Image: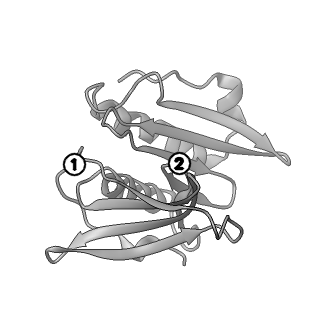
C-alpha cells in the first residue's frame, strides 16, 4: 500500500525513536495491502507543538463501520487512539527503541484483530466513554475504560460497538501499559 512519504524537512524534525518508527512502520503498513486499508484516509503527518515534533500515523480500515487507529509519537509518550477517543498509552521508561516498536506493533495487531472490541458510549450522539475489550477464555473481558469528565449526564444514552476482522486472533498485551 502506498502512503505519501514525509518530506526530508519533516523527517529532520523527528527525534531518534520517531525516525525509527517511521522507517519500520512503512514495512508494517506495506505488508497490509489496499484490501484492508483505505489509502485515501491512511497517512503520516508531523505536527509541531511547543518546539517538539509529534509523528502521527493514521490507519483507516475499509471495513464497515470503519475502524481507525491513530498512533501519536511525541518526545515523551506513545498514544494509540482507537476510533473517536478511546486510547492506550505505552510506557517509555526503561525500554530500548526496538522494544518500544515491538510493543507498539503488538498493540496495533491486537486492535486490528477479532480479539479486540471497542464500545463507545454516547450521550445525545456525542461520545463520552470508551471500553476496550479482549476476547479471552471464550468471553469478552474488559481491559480498560477511558472517559470524559464533563458530558451531558441527562442526554439520551446509546452505545456503538466496533471490531476489526483484519487479523483472526491476537492477545491483549496488558504488560505494555503504564496505567
Question: Does residue 172 appear to the left or right of 98 in the view shown?
Answer: left
Determine crowd level at label 2: few under 14, some 14-19, many 20+ residues with C-alpha closer than 10 A: many
The residue depicted at 38 percent of the width and 27 percent of the height is 38
Q: Decide: is 19 above or below 163.
A: above
Where the C terminus falls, by quadrant? bottom right
Nearest to the observer: residue 61 or residue 5: 61
Residue 145 in view in this figure: yes
Nearest to the observer: residue 121 or residue 76: 121
Q: Decide: is 152 above or below 70.
A: below
The residue depicted at 53 percent of the width and 48 percent of the height is 71
How far across and down, in percent of the image, does residue 16 sit? 62, 48
Q: Decide: is 145 above or below 48.
A: below
Circle 2 residue: 71
Determine crowd level at label 1: few under 14, some 14-19, many 20+ residues with C-alpha closer than 10 A: few
How far across and down, in percent of the image, does residue 116 sit? 30, 60
User: Do residues under tags 2 and 1 come within 8 Å of each other at their CB atoms?
Assistant: no
Nearest to the observer: residue 169 or residue 133: 133
Tell me the element at label 2.
strand
Res 7 quadrant in image: top right
How far across and down, in percent of the image, does residue 85 sit? 56, 55
How far across and down, in percent of the image, does residue 162 sit? 35, 52
Where the N terminus falls, by quadrant? top left
Tell me the element at label 1.
loop
Q: How far apart are marks 2 and 1 (CA)?
A: 19 Å
Residue 91 in view in this figure: no
Residue at the extreme left: 138
The residue depicted at 32 percent of the width and 37 percent of the height is 64
Circle 1 residue: 167
The residue depicted at 72 percent of the width and 38 percent of the height is 47
Res 31 quadrant in image: top left
Q: Which of marks 2 and 1 is nearer the N terminus?
A: 2
Amino acid at each position: 500500500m502506498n502512503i505519501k512519504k514525509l518530506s526530508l524537512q519533516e523527517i529532520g524534525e523527528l527525534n531518534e525513536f520517531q525516525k525509527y518508527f517511521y522507517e519500520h512502520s512503512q514495512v508494517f503498513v506495506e505488508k497490509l495491502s489496499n484490501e484492508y486499508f483505505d489509502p485515501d484516509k491512511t497517512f503520516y503527518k508531523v505536527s509541531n507543538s511547543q518546539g517538539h515534533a509529534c509523528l502521527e500515523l493514521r490507519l483507516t480500515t475499509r471495513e464497515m463501520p470503519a475502524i481507525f487507529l491513530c498512533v501519536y509519537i511525541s518526545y515523551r509518550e506513545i498514544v494509540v487512539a482507537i476510533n473517536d477517543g478511546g486510547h492506550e498509552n505505552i510506557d517509555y521508561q526503561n525500554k530500548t527503541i526496538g522494544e518500544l516498536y515491538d510493543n507498539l506493533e503488538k498493540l496495533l495487531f491486537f486492535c486490528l484483530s477479532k480479539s479486540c472490541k471497542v464500545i463507545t458510549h454516547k450521550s445525545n450522539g456525542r461520545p463520552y466513554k470508551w471500553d476496550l475489550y479482549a476476547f479471552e477464555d471464550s468471553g469478552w473481558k474488559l481491559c480498560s475504560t477511558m472517559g470524559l469528565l464533563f458530558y451531558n449526564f441527562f442526554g439520551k444514552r446509546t452505545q456503538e460497538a466496533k471490531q476489526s476482522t483484519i487479523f483472526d486472533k491476537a492477545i491483549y498485551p496488558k504488560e505494555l501499559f503504564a496505567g
